[in-house]
Amino acid sequence: MLNGKNNKNGWIVSNLFLSYQTLISPLGTTIPEHVAAFKARQTAIAIHPNAGFNQSTLPVAKITAITNNRYDAILKMAIEALKKQTDLATLQSDETLFIVSSTKGNMDAFDTDAFQSTRTILSEELAIAHAPLIISNACISGVLAINTAADYLKTDRFKDVFIIGIDAVSDFVLFGFQSLYALSDGPCKPFDKERTGTSLGEACGIVRLSVEPTKNAVEYLGGTSSNDANHISGPSRTGEGLYRAVNRAIKLSGIQHKDIDFISAHGTGTVFNDEMESIAFGRLEMEQVPVNSMKGYFGHTLGAAGVIETIMTIVSMQENTLFESLGYSEPGTSQAIQLITSTKEAPIHIALKTASGFGGGNAALILKKQL
Amino acid sequence: MSDFKETLKAQIIEQLNLEDLQPSDIQDDAPLFGEDGLGLDSIDALEFIVLLDSNYNIKIADPNQGRDIFYSVNTLADYISKNKQ
Amino acid sequence: MRILAHSYIQPNGIWLNQTCVKSTVGEENWLKAIYQNSGVEYPKFYKMDDLSKMSFLSSELLRKFIPAEIDQENELALIFANHSTSQLTDTKFHDSYAVQGNPSPSLFVYTLPNILTGELCIRNKWYGENCFYISEQFDAALFIDQIQFAFNHGNSCCLCGWVEAKTDGSHECFLFLVLLSEEKLDINTLNNLYKTYKNE
């Protein structure tokens, strides 16, 4: 069935193919809408009076059409779009697995079961064959979920894994980030000298990882994670975990550092996170590789971030387009890195996606364009 | 003032979950942060801001201001007595 | 894969390899009692949420079973799961702003279940792979899959845990340490081990 070979652990080594399925965010409900928004330098982040604690004003990337039960509403929109995009037989196949990446699930039910609605919606709307696997590992969840999907496909039990990355804006998370003084007064400015914090957003993205090439697919080469072993809420000052995660991902992918043409960084816009990432990329000798953060477009969408930013990375690769790192204008990290200052064409054969988050987690994955 | 400092120490222990400490373990002039002091970190500094707001109705807008205010029990007590509403 | 050691914590005490290490029947602050009995000095313990506290106390017992030749820094993976995510701390953080009027930063940082794996990594200088899964009940098949995947990635040891801290007080923490080996670990063996503790 597979064109791969068994290694000594009975583990199948073969090519895997990653394609985007759907993307729901304040910027649009289709991939072309998002491409257009990126090209038009449009941000989903808007100033919302009363959004913050004690009715304070905050920049937030919210889907304004949704007024309540946000998480379920966003998930249902994405599932509807998925059904139009992919045949039901594949979605419901016994050889198909669903993995959900979310930091908080449905916050309207945080005190009972934040993930019950996820299970119910996937079962009722899609009648999937297996219970979804849920990953909740802070801001690296999305990248971890794609890496985990690859593990399952290599068992030969599944042909397709659909990875759903989702989080919705909630008072809970907004107030929490406010209590950490981690939010910017205006839309976030990742890696910029004037950055003062992140901006939160909401989104749902779905990607498909398959053993057979699919439409719009790039090759998934490999990925891994590494903990900073340093602090539960602050990034390592040396970028230790990110450095290790990227190095291991490169090794697992069978490529070399110099092969990477583009980095989709985490880039939250907080002073310490962006500084940490620049240091890690410097240590990796990738300071000349074009890099962006997509938080300036989407805001920080937490459990969705790794998935939706991977979607736009696939778009970048297919369209040979380096998207501007929106919000960046002047160097603002001690290690200079190659932020993309305007959207332009360039060949991208191999791309690196990274994520870092609370709990000291860092994750990386590497994609290659099919020739 | 010394009674006030004892109250403050008890509040610090409660707010920062320093259950293993007694108020008498905290010296009035010893640094609260860093390895030499109580080993408090950046999240504790933010929790001090909550403590000041909840107990003394003192608001600190810029957490960077906190570095000097929360240096020791003495500096904290001094700041509270000058700014209490 | 071979289970080297396992432990269990619930409000009545802590067990190592099915032997009770400390009974906390009737103790009001049972986690503190276990900590004080452990002889471990780690003041940060008091700042942790209950998920982290339980995992920390268990891991302090289990880490002694990690073979000396294992490269713990790089080749030890953490595989954790639960049903209720960070529900107990979520409720406390919610109260901090909705009832007490000030969102607490030190509570907020624990409103993610994977913070506990971060705590274990900091304590032990483990830089390896971590992942936290949410499942409706203890799922032996999930753990066995993830352990196999971790070994496939080049890890040689896994510390796995099922850790719950719910608002109804039903805390439990089942940790087990697994070594890469030729032996097979089957779902029933792992399920039975968990059930033996659970029903004790």
Image (tube, coloured by chain):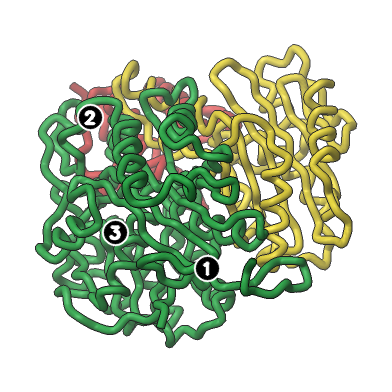
Chain colours: A green, B red, C yellow
Residue at the spot of label 1? A16
Q: Residue at x 32, y 40 (%)?
A: A80
The amino acid marked with disc number 1 is Leu
Q: Residue at x 67, y 59 (%)?
A: A155
The amino acid marked with disc number 2 is Phe
Is the residue under label 2 in contact with that under label 1 (CB below 8 Å)? no
Residue at the spot of label 3? A271
Query: Which of the two residues, A342 or A320, is positioned nearer the viewer here?
Result: A320
Q: CA distance from mark 1 to mark 2?
A: 45 Å
Say yes or no: labels 1 and 2 on the same chain: yes
Q: Chain of mark 1?
A: A
Alpha-carbon neighbours of circle 2 within 10 Å: few (<14), some, or many (≥20)?
many
Which comes sooner in the sequence, label 1 or label 2? 1
Q: Which SS class for mark 2? A: helix
Q: Position of residue C200 (x, y in %)?
A: 84, 21
**Relative to residue B14, is residue A62 depicted above or below?**
below
Say yes or no: labels 3 and 1 on the same chain: yes
Query: Which of the two residues, B48 or A217, is positioned nearer the viewer here?
Result: A217
Q: Quadrant of residue A200?
A: top left
Q: Is residue A165 left or right of residue A271?
A: right
**Relative to residue C199, is residue A329 depicted above or below?**
below
**Relative to residue B14, is residue C112 depicted above or below?**
below
Residue at the spot of label 2? A53
Q: Nearer the viewer, mark 3 or mark 1?
A: 1
Classify the position of the C terminus of chain A by image quarter: bottom left
